[in-house]
Amino acid sequence: MLYLKDWKGSQKSFCSLIGLLSLTIMLLTSCGEDTYFKNKEITMEAFSDMKAPAFVFNHQQIAQLVAEMARHTPVVTEADRRTRDYYTQGSAAMLWIDRWGVDHRADSLLAKLHQVGEIGMSENAFCVSDIERDIQQLRQLNIGEGSDDINHLAARLEFHLTRACMRYAYGHRYGFINPNRIFNHLDPDDKTDSLRRIVRYRGLFDVDMDYAPASYYQTVAQKITQDSIAEYLTEIQPHGKLYDQLKSMLKTASTDEQRQRILCNMERCRWRLHHPIPETGKRIIVNIPAYHLYAYGGDTTLHMRVVCGAMRTKTPLLASEVEWMEVNPQWVIPQSILEKDVVRHVGDSAYFARNKYNIYERATNKQMEIGEVTKAMLLSGKYRVAQQSGDDNSLGRIVFRFKNKFSVFLHYTSTPWVFQRDSRAISHGCVRVAEPYELAAFVLDKPDEWLLDRIRISMGLSAMTDRGRQYLRTHQSEEDHKLIGYVPVKPHVPLYIIYYTLWPNEQGTLQAWPDVYGYDRVVLQHLQPYLS
């Protein structure tokens, strides 16, 4: 029999005692008037000697023990930190322990925790065996002394149930890791302070997605107290074709490498994007590990090789929309590339002429004489270096522009031979596309033939229409061939630059791709608390 000692120190019997009293009353009332029963005037006081101290819950002591556990248990995850905060704030209500011990809510949670192996997680990370042992001990009244007394037992259950529930809920609702925090603190910038400490990191991830708000643990706590936790944990399960496919593959993974690759890509599927890749409509997907671009829309499917950023200048992961194209663009060299590759050539007129670089004052757009520009002037940020348009331009003949905070874009190249390489992580961060005209035709909405031909002629390609061929016969100069510069894309076409080492190839078959940036290792490292 269990009892709860309230805040004033009084003791109230319940559970088995209430049951016994109810049975006694039933027996009394079921007797006829002529039946003699000598204990007819029985009272609650008659059971006072059954209040065994070993079975008495002390609410205050349990709360103190839980708070002590919360303070001394290592915090490894965001869910752990929120669990600690909840129980150390001084007035936390018990979520699982009440005067009846623990009820079916704990069993519902355990049923979910027993399924974590299906997603590659370890039950040990959710204290499953400890919870089961303590529940059995409590329900069988196998109460010991000291650290195994009723209050220590209740405190352990309260803390472990909450910690496991928080870990499960945070992971399934928002993902077990935070990619924004991890990837944007991965690659230090070259700049350091006077003590040579890192002061800035390169941005590598900018995808709008759900992140757990500071109050999320309160939402979970409310679901527990309202007896709706079972339904909620079912409701937040990740869904999606790729996720389900990977989950099924996990069952038959035969090597550690296969298993780890699947786990990393399942985690990516748990991130709740505000704008997930749609199943229909026009969309462009660049998967960095595959060095490939896939464009889908209606009956059109386009795929091509791409070149991505090198290890030191990784292509960032992002979601945006292609808004316009620029044919025969100038390349305004980013300040970071200017500082690393160009500044050391200040004063070398041959270098600037060979690369067709011009220097302009930003405020006036005045072109400067190469010999007049010093290293300090270029480093000041008041001058820009631009490469002239043409076949030798690093952007090639066309660039696809979309909003992003990294100054990256899709473009062609002046060195098309790089597309024949197997490993194509060599750019400064932008994505070079192997078939730029085909991509230009794809992003436009029902373009007329003359618009497409003007783009082709401007890119230095042969004309496809009689009108275009006639134009080329009568206009011989290179400048005359630049028929079009700015080309708007309406409606805008969604673009996703992603990183999946398991992703469908052009035939739609799920294929493994190399971990070119080592991101799988990073994801796996941060998943480790849940795997052991």
Image (tube, helix red, strand yellow):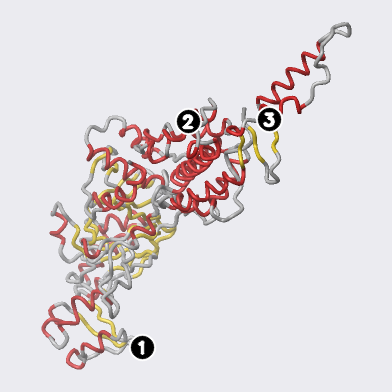
Q: Given the image, on which type of amino acid does mark 3 rest?
A: Phe
Image quarter (top left, top right, bottom left or bottom right) of the C terminus: top left
Across and down, in percent, residue 193 comes to 30, 78
The residue tagged 1 is: 363
Judging by the rendered image, the residue that carries numbered circle 3 is 14
73 lies above or below 38: below
- As drawn, is 138 to the left or to the right of 507? right
Tag 1: amino acid: Ala
Measured Cα–Cα span from mark 1 to mark 2: 67 Å
Position in image of residue 453 (x %, y %): 28, 61
Tell me the SS state at disc 2.
helix
Q: Mark 2 points at which residue?
A: 111
Question: Where, by quadrant of the figure, is residue 46 drawn?
Answer: top right
**Could you tell which of marks 1 and 3 lies nearer the N-terminus?**
3
Q: Residues within 10 Å of mark 2 (few under 14, many from 20)?
A: few
Q: Which of 468/221 is in front?
A: 221
Is the residue marked by circle 3 packed among few (<14), some (14-19), or many (20+) residues within 10 Å?
some
